[in-house]
Image (spheres, rainbow, N blue to C red):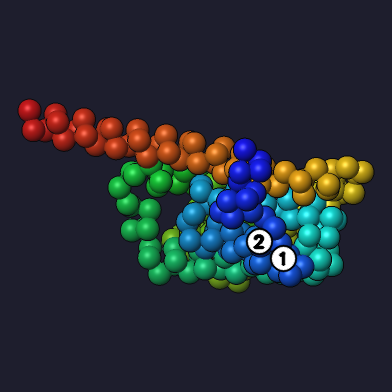
Amino acid sequence: MHHALATSGMLDPAAWLDGGGVAALAIVCGVVFAETGLLLGFLLPGDTLLFLTGVLTVSGKISQPLWLVLLVVALATTLGGELGYTIGRRGGPAVFERRESGLFSRDSVERTQQFFDRFGAATVAVARFVAVVRTFAPVAAGVGRMRRGAFSAWNAVGAVSWTVVLIVLGYLLGSIPGVAEFVDSYLDVILVAVIAVFAAPVLTRVLVARHRRQQAQDASGA
């Protein structure tokens, strides 16, 4: 499986690690940006990618110095949060009034609201470390008309903290002899496993939501 994936070109990490890993770093930045800026966090393994980024920085696959990697990724994360806030601010409550689809879960919105009830404005920073909640928190802050200055401050704190903690943890783990080499050798398998773990619950929710809609249609037509 490992060889087949590597030679297929579809998930061959060597293809986007060429040139000092610039493309790989760009992909990481794109993922963390979209995770909070485009309501796609439930589909994207941001935590895992940041951790792997630290390991790949140790191995040299990402050749940029650690400080530059941290700076660029933190900036992308911050900008993603700002976009999410803008979407919520301009879209208003209608953003969260979409039909339950499996991809969009009202449970996630309610969970995000519970965080705001508990932590207040600090939720914007705290949510960075909670999958899914970090996706909805910036948008919810915008919908709730949170003051822009306060949001931006907490957003920056959360973005920098999340980026530094996870990438540095990956960097430290990658510094252990043999770890970085193992990740380099099996990066394609690791990516497939991560994608599968994140995709499975999403696919399940989509199928369940579709089944419920079909049942409702059948009941109304009976």
Total numbered circles: 2
The disc placed on residue 15 is 2
**Circle 2 crowding by C-alpha within 10 Å: few under 14, some 14–19, many from 20:** some
Which residue: 27% across, 32% down?
A: 212
Residue lying at 54% horizontally and 61% vertically, measured from the top left: 34
Q: Looking at the rendering, which quadrant does residue 19 occupy?
A: bottom right
Q: Residue at x 76, y 46 (%)?
A: 185
On screen, residue 208 above or below 164:
above
Q: Residue 93 vs residue 161: left or right?
A: left
State the image coordinates of residue 218 (x, y, percent, origin top left).
14, 31
The local secondary structure at tag 1 comes to loop
Residue 107 in the image: x percent, y percent? 43, 39
- Residue 33: name its quadrant: bottom right
Q: Which residue in the protein does label 1 denote?
A: 18
Against 107, residue 39 (above or below) is below
> In the image, residue 100 lies at what x, y percent?
33, 44
Distance from disc 1 to disc 2, alpha carbons, whole Å, reads 6 Å
> Considering only vertical position in the picture, is 134 above or below 69?
above
Q: The residue tagged with tag 2: helix, strand or loop?
A: helix
Q: Position of residue 53 (x, y in %)?
A: 74, 55
Residue situated furthest left in the rendering: 222
Q: Which amino acid type corresponds to the residue marked 2 in the rendered image? A: Ala
Q: Is residue 220 left or right of residue 141?
A: left
Mark yes or no: residue 197 visible: yes
Asked whether 101 or 195 is in front, the reply is 195
- Give yes or no for contact between labels 1 and 2 (Cβ–Cβ under 8 Å): yes
> What amino acid is found at the position of numbered circle 1 in the picture?
Asp
Residue 67 visible in the picture: no
Q: Residue at the location (67% across, 52% down)?
A: 49
216 or 150: nearer the viewer: 216
